[in-house]
Image: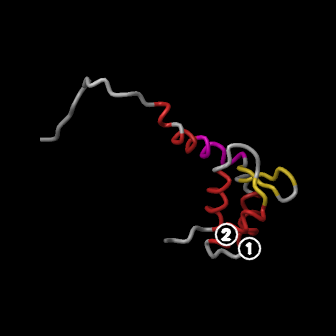
Amino acid sequence: MERPSPRSLILDLLSTLQRGSMPVAALVEAGDLFGIPGGSVRVALARLLAAGRVARDSRGRYRVGPQALPVQRWVGGWRRLDAQTRSWDGSWHAVHLPT
């Protein structure tokens, strides 16, 4: 399995939150599970914070920042894909078969 970058790990984890924030200790612990040193996680977190991709709720707690919200909303739409589909009624509108 390919090891994620500290940046992608942080954004992926924070994107799973519906509300609230995650403590930096949990992000560092998750990085440790993937063999990512805590210092690398903290540096990536500081850079993401400076870029607006993450935001700090309080001391040591982070959430998705304003620069990453459009992507999070787009990805979140895939989580609700079942609600956007309907059962097939058996009829066809058009079928294209290559020759």
The amino acid at mark 1 is Gly
Q: Residue at x 54, y 39 (%)?
A: 77
Mark linked to residue 38: 1
Question: What secondary structure is marked by label 1?
Answer: helix
Residue 62 in the image, given as x and y percentages of width and height = 77, 54
Q: Give the range drawn in magenta.
A: 66-73
Q: In this view, does 63 lie to the left or right of 90?
A: right
Asked whether disc 1 touches disc 2, contact meaning CB atoms under 8 Å apart, the reply is yes
Mark linked to residue 31: 2
- Answer whether residue 72 is magenta in the image: yes
Magenta stretch prevailing secondary structure: helix
Question: What secondary structure is marked by label 2?
Answer: helix
Identify the coloring: secondary structure
- Answer whether residue 69 is magenta in the image: yes
Label tally: 2
Q: Give the vertical position of 74 relative to 8 (above or below).
A: above
Q: Is residue 29 left or right of residue 81?
A: right
- Going by the picture, which residue comes out furthest to the left? 99
